Structures are given as structure tokens and as C-alpha cells.
Amino acid sequence: MNAAEVVALLTPMFREMLDDVELASLRFGIVPMDDPDGPHRLRDDDPVRSNAAVVRWQILGERGWSRGLDGDEDTATLVRGVQSDLQDFISESDFGWGQLRGPRDLT
């Protein structure tokens, strides 16, 4: 799986998890795991290799990252892993402190 395919898979999940204001502020991309805070994103056609990349997001000025991605994982597992990390981020953020969002089966 390449970076563009991962972004396409994750976009509906972000829409589900964020409200309209949060979604309008969202910036996210696939970045190298060894430099998640750096300026470089993977190019659309770059492969997403096991534990070599993470999803980096910024929502309402707050930044977060997912666990390492595995492009060989089945798509549902990949999306659920990022969704779980996003849920943790939301519940610890200033804008969503303590909130549980998304599917109830993430617990």
C-alpha cells in the first residue's frame, strides 16, 4: 500500500471522529517514523512499509501522531489502529478533553 492509499482509507475515519470545526482545521499526512516532527511527508506513491511511517495530524493547533503503520496489514486493522490513537489524542486534547468518540467497540 502506498501513502496516497493510506490517506484515502483514513479520510472517512477522520470525518467520523471530528466535528465540523475540528475537521475544517485538520491537516494530516503520512510521515517517516524516524522523523515524525520533521517537515517531510511521504510522497503519494511511496510505499508504507511496516513501522517505517506514522500518521501525523494537526487539529485546532494541537499535533499528534499514530503508532507505526504497516501497509501490509488488512485495511480494517490499519484504520482501527489509527482511530484508536486518534481517540486517545482527542480525549487528552484541549478541544475534546475526556470525550469518547467513534465506534463503541474501541474500548
Image: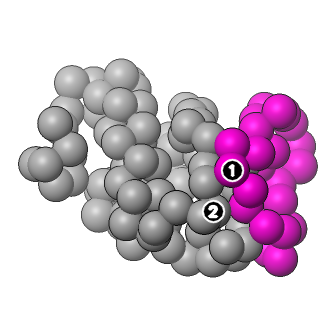
The span picked out in magenta is: 31-52
Q: Residues within 10 Å of mark 1 (few under 14, many from 20)?
A: few
Residue 33 visible in the snapshot: yes
Residue 24 visible in the snapshot: no
Q: Residue at x 20, y 44 (%)?
A: 106
104 or 52: nearer the viewer: 52
Residue at mark 2 to residue at mark 1: CA–CA distance: 6 Å
Q: Residue 27: horizontal and vertical position, in percent?
A: 62, 55
Q: Residue 3: horizontal and vertical position, in percent?
A: 72, 68
Residue 1 numbered mark, or none: none
Kindly indicate the quadrant of the structure image that contains residue 45: bottom right
Membership of 29 in magenta stretch: no
Q: Residue at x 69, y 43 (%)?
A: 51
47 or 84: nearer the viewer: 47
53 or 18: nearer the viewer: 53
Q: Could you tell me the amino acid type at mark 2? A: Gly
Q: Tell me whether circle 2 and circle 1 mark residues in contact (CB < 8 Å).
A: yes
Q: Residue at x 52, y 61 (%)?
A: 73
Q: Residue 89: horizontal and vertical position, in percent?
A: 41, 32
Q: Could you tell me the amino acid type at mark 1? A: Ser
Query: Looking at the image, is mark 2 or mark 1 earlier in the sequence?
Result: 1
> Where does label 1 land, which residue?
50
Q: Residue at x 30, y 55 (%)?
A: 17
